Image (cartoon, helix red, strand yellow):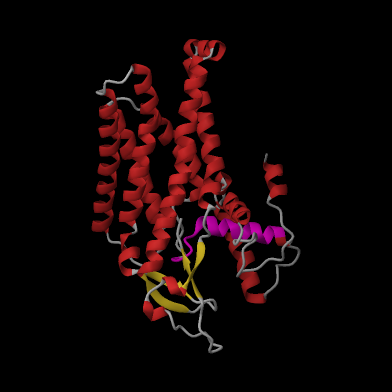
Amino acid sequence: MSSFLSRVLSSTKPFSLNEDQFDQNTYWGRVKHFVNLTNPLNMLVTSKQLEESHEKVEHFKETGKNPQGVPNEEMWKAKGILQATFHPDTGEKILVPFRFSAFVPMNILIIGGMVGARTIPSTIFWQGINQTYNVCVNHANRNASNPVNNTELVTNYFAAVFSSVGTAVGLSEAVKRSALSAATKEKLLIGVPLLAVIAANICNIGLMRRAEMQHGIFIKDEEGKVMGKSPAAGRLAVATTVFSRIVLVIPGMLGPPLLIRYLDQTKSVGGLFKKRPFVRSAVNITTIAIMIQLSLPLAIGLFPQYASVPLSWLEPEFQDHKLSTGETATYAIYNKGL
């Protein structure tokens, strides 16, 4: 599997600090980029490997050349390790559990708990765990144009948890108390955790990144010069992030429970599940892992991390921005965040 991915993601493109290994203007180029970024093996990178990667990139930055005997492929790998480890705006190291390379391992247990929750206490527990993790991930991978204080973090956290738990418990109880048949109720209950997570994602990301929509995020012209802060770009960054996160959770939260429900009804596999419940759990966890790992780069690759936006979409003060050539700029670039 590892060698297969290496062949798929291999590139003979000369190394560059200012460009990405894969074309970010194409969907599959972005998917390949995020396959590298979200690779769980990045969690296992040692301090020595991190230091070596830093030294290689710094050597190129100072000399404009690869270190002696280091091929382009190894330089791209070094740059990818740094991108997966450090925040692009602040340069600070992201804690391992909150990096996107840890997203799949962390979510296997969480999603397994949420889709299996059928009582109010278990629903509250797993939705609370999920939103606690999401708050940390959203904060760690935000656009860092605006500082967020501890009061805002705590407020946003509780708002996200209450929205998630309220939606999950409310929908679950509404379905259970309805006059529908038991079979219909069971089918509907499969989708309740997904709806709760979608509602919570909208609330969570919106609250955690509210400052970006209110005060704006830094935008740059096509020459890389900072133009100022744009609330319009901030709203666009948050909206595209919310959309990609919604797409991300659908396969992992619908696929496994539907598959398990189908297998439960088959004579051979269903009988095996009843005799050996651990097999059922293993199939469920494996399916969740596969679904999340596949959907993660496909979902966050829907939009480039460094996106461009026409100046006509932004505030009036940016409309007549001049480039060093004297020409009027046509678009701005901003960090969407993940």
Location of the N terminus by quadrant is top right
Residue 258, given in percent of the width and then of the height, sits at 47, 27
Relative vertical location of residue 273 with respect to residue 160 in this rendering, above or below = above
Q: Is residue 52 visible?
A: no
Q: Is residue 89 magenta?
A: yes
Q: Is residue 112 left or right of residue 82?
A: left
Compared to residue 120, the image places residue 87 above or below, namely below
Report the span colored magenta. Answer: 73-90
x and y percent of residue 219 in the render? 44, 72
Would you identify the image quadrant in which residue 229 lies?
bottom left
Name the magenta segment's main secondary structure: helix
* 101 left or right, relative to 117: right
Q: Quadrant of residue 239?
A: bottom left
Q: Residue at x 39, y 37 (%)?
A: 194
Residue 274 is situated, as x and y percent measured from the top left of the image, at: 47, 12
Residue that appears at 36% across and 34% down: 193
Q: Is residue 218 above or below residue 303?
A: below
Residue situated in front as seen by the camera: 267 or 123? 267
Residue at the far bottom: name it. 326
Marks counted in the figure total: 0
Q: Is residue 109 magenta?
A: no
Q: Is residue 58 visible?
A: yes
Residue shown at the point (47%, 65%) measured from the top left: 335
Out of 319 and 121, give the one closest to the viewer. Answer: 319
Residue 55 point in image, percent of width and height: 61, 65
- Is 2 in front, or is 123? 123
